[in-house]
């Protein structure tokens, strides 16, 4: 495996100054913990901020910091205190964090924050360029560095580059609130592979990329200029065996015994979170208070152990929530406590592994109810720790982990009644049922642990890079073009098969704007007037439109994807008679979709009906198109009618009609010594498929195709055809 460069805001090693001396210790962040075991066992290097401001490191100490971190396979990016305040505490945690978690009321939009964010991303780019080799694999992590992929792509053209977001990506309606939304999209699209925890976040990103940047996608693939970008879901795992075997460690066993001596035989409900407003801790405590009010029989029989890990202590909202939390804990304990029992144990600190593992092991219930969470590894750690299978997880449907841990009791974190019932159900669940649920979840997270997660991401990144290289190899380059033109020049029987929309002219949202201009008409006239050329316009448009546009040219026409053919000098004809009695029933269905989908319309051709949604809201159009295909499929199944999906159009037509079949009439009529077929649509694949091996075939646009070569857009095709026109003038 090639060297892997991991880049994140924080290094897995934190540098601190204590009593005048610099100390080095493992970072406590979720990303650092999650990837630590993976990167240590691979040829890796980790770039990030060491956690101490540049001003607090003496010049003579800087070299020591760099050398010490280098031995730990780390490389520091030194940030000033101003950077930390404006970039980290500012843009990252006052803008992106609340916005991406749907707390728009906490979101601050500051130009100073944004400028600092850009500057720090540039500093990270500089650090990467200082150590990166041309074949290194680059993996960028999280919302702190969303501009970095784009910055690096300008210099590192060929390096495999992945980006993973560890927090939710919001819906377009929320993301669009960000003034710098376009810059963020462009920055992320510098990566070859963009990963999220769940498909919901993938869908949100693709929607924003389309609506903001105009990028369309197919199965999560976006073509950015001439580069393929893949967007996919990779649910992050944990070090399963570490937690599963934790109860076997002597230190953990001692902690279990110590805690048990204090809780006696009471049921334990565990809550472990960073002290963050996104975690729903206040709502969780209010619900526990409500639970005790509604179920007084549980008083003195259950204890909630609440662990709140300090975070972002310099930000106002976090100081406020800490004060609210402590007041609420005091209020609930004062209200419900009895002699020798308090309902809530409140711990405001980070816990060592032995204590955390002990709490996971003894907890009868783990209550995880974030209001919004990218994944939530606490839920997975709790389940993994249950070696005996006993324990119940209550999990918010707003956590990414809920997609995997379906056997947990899934709740709406805002529904007090639902969580209360879930607590009661969990505390009374039979051991057999607990073990059954836990075993299923453990099997899943054991298979997809953190190493598998990282391996899958890197393998997918290499696959995308290989796909890019294959596409690049098939690009119509200068050498191929010169060889093609030389072949064209010396040939005597040429067949030119040309799609129209998107090939000779740009695709237009409004069809009436696609009328050929004088330049393209003159080009086609000159090509057809050469007696060595047989030129065919192969289009999906109806015959009347093609007749109107090209009636002055002595040219062959194929309309309606092969439904009608018109050899030059002859009348329109069909290859065989086709039934159209099915159209009335289908038209009624299409009319219903037009009524319920503003902007859509029906186009009727001789042998087909088409439902266009090019003017429809993007997401709505995709949904309606899927629904329409399902509705029609039940009617046309086992018939000679087929459903074809084109560029923002669903077309229903007779199954025997396609461009390839229509082209065969010319393909078999002569001994051609030069054949060229060009198209941009999936309907042109029928032509590419039937061509002889020696033929030239060109796909306009970057998408999977049977064509031999690719070009970016119609302008390259025009240039090629104009060069052919010039060759006609040169040869006798």
Image (cartoon, helix red, strand yellow):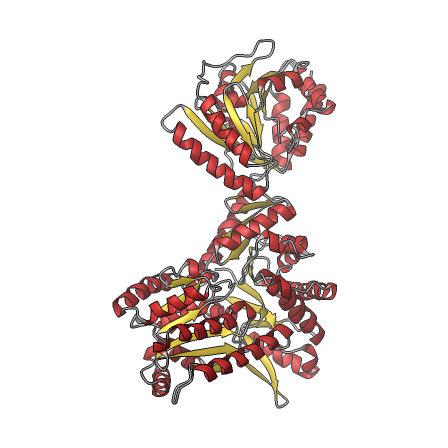
Residue 196 visible at all: yes
Q: Is residue 406 left or right of residue 124?
A: left
Residue furthest left in the image: 432
Q: Where residue 444 appears, x then y in whole percent?
A: 36, 61
* Towards the viewer: 158 or 297: 297
Residue at image point 66% right, 73% down: 78
Residue at image point 54% right, 62% down: 167
* Towards the viewer: 595 or 731: 595
* Towards the viewer: 563 or 661: 563
Q: Where residue 242 appears, x then y in whole percent?
A: 38, 73
Above or below, 541 against 268 in this view is above
Residue at image point 62% right, 73% down: 317
Residue furthest top in the image: 570
Q: Where residue 623 appears, x then y in whole percent?
A: 51, 41
* Towards the viewer: 74 or 288: 288
Quarter of the picture holding the C terminus = top right
């Amino acid at each position: 495996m090639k060297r892997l460069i991991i880049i994140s805001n924080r290094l897995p090693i934190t540098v601190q100054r204590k009593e005048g001396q610099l100390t080095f210790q493992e970072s406590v962040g979720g990303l650092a913990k999650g990837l630590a075991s993976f990167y240590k066992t691979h040829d890796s290097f980790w770039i990030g901020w060491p956690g101490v401001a540049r001003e607090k490191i003496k010049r003579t100490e800087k070299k020591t910091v760099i050398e010490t971190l280098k031995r730990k396979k780390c490389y520091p990016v030194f940030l000033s205190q101003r950077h930390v305040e404006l970039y980290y505490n500012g843009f990252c945690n006052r803008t992106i964090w609340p916005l991406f978690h749907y707390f728009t009321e906490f979101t601050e939009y500051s130009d100073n924050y944004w400028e600092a964010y850009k500057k720090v991303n540039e500093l990270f780019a500089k650090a990467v360029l200082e150590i990166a080799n041309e074949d290194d694999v680059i993996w960028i992590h999280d919302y702190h560095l969303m501009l970095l992929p784009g910055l690096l792509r300008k210099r590192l053209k060929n390096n495999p580059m992945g980006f993973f977001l560890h927090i939710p990506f919001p819906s377009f309606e929320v993301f669009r609130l960000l003034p710098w939304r376009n810059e963020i999209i462009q920055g992320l699209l510098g990566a070859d592979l963009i990963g999220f925890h769940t498909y919901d976040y993938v869908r949100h990103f693709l929607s924003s990329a389309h609506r903001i940047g105009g990028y369309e996608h197919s199965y999560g693939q976006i073509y950015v200029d001439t580069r393929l970008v893949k967007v996919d879901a990779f649910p992050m795992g944990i070090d399963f065996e570490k937690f599963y075997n934790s109860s076997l460690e002597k230190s953990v066993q001692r902690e279990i015994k110590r805690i048990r001596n204090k809780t006696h035989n009471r049921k334990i409900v565990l809550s472990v979170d960073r002290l963050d407003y996104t975690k729903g801790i206040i709502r969780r405590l209010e619900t526990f208070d409500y639970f005790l009010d509604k179920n007084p029989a549980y008083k003195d029989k259950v204890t909630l152990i609440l662990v709140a890990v300090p975070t972002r202590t310099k930000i106002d909202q976090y100081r406020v929530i800490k004060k609210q939390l402590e007041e609420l804990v005091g209020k609930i304990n004062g209200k419900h406590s009895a002699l020798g029992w308090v309902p809530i144990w409140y711990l405001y600190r980070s816990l060592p592994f032995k204590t955390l593992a002990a709490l996971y092991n003894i907890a009868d219930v783990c209550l995880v109810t974030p209001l919004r969470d990218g994944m939530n590894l606490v839920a997975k750690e709790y389940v993994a720790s249950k070696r005996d299978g006993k324990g119940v997880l209550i999990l918010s449907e707003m956590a990414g982990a809920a997609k995997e841990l379906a056997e947990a009791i899934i709740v709406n974190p805002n529904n007090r009644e639902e969580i209360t019932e879930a607590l009661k159900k969990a505390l009374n669940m039979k051991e057999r049922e607990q073990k059954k649920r836990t075993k299923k979840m453990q099997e899943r997270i054991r298979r997809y642990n953190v190493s598998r997660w990282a391996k899958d991401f890197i393998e997918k990144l290499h696959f995308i890079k290989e796909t890019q290289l294959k596409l690049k190899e098939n690009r119509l380059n200068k050498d191929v073009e010169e060889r093609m033109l030389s072949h064209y020049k010396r040939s005597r029987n040429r067949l030119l098969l040309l799609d129209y929309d998107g090939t000779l002219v740009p695709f237009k949202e409004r069809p009436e704007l696609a009328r050929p201009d004088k330049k393209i008409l003159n080009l086609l006239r000159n090509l057809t007037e050469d007696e060595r050329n047989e030129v065919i316009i192969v289009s999906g448009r109806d015959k009347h439109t093609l007749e109107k546009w090209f009636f002055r040219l002595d040219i062959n026409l194929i309309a309606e994807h092969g439904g009608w053919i018109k050899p030059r000098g002859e009348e329109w004809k069909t290859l065989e008679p086709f039934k159209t009695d099915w159209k009335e029933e289908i038209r009624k269905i299409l009319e219903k979709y037009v009524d319920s989908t503003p902007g859509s319309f029906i186009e009727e051709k001789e042998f087909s009906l088409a439902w266009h949604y090019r003017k429809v809201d993007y997401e709505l159009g995709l949904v309606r198109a899927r629904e329409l295909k399902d509705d029609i499929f039940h009617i046309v199944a086992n018939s000679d009618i087929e459903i074809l999906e084109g560029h923002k159009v669903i077309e229903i037509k007779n199954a025997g009609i396609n461009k390839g079949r229509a082209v065969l009439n010319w393909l078999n009529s002569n001994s051609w010594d030069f054949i060229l077929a060009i198209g941009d649509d999936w309907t042109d694949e029928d032509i590419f498929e039937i061509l002889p091996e020696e033929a030239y075939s060109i796909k306009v646009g970057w998408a999977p195709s049977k064509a031999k070569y690719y070009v970016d857009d119609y302008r390259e095709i025009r240039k090629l055809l104009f060069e052919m026109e010039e060759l006609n003038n040169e040869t006798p």
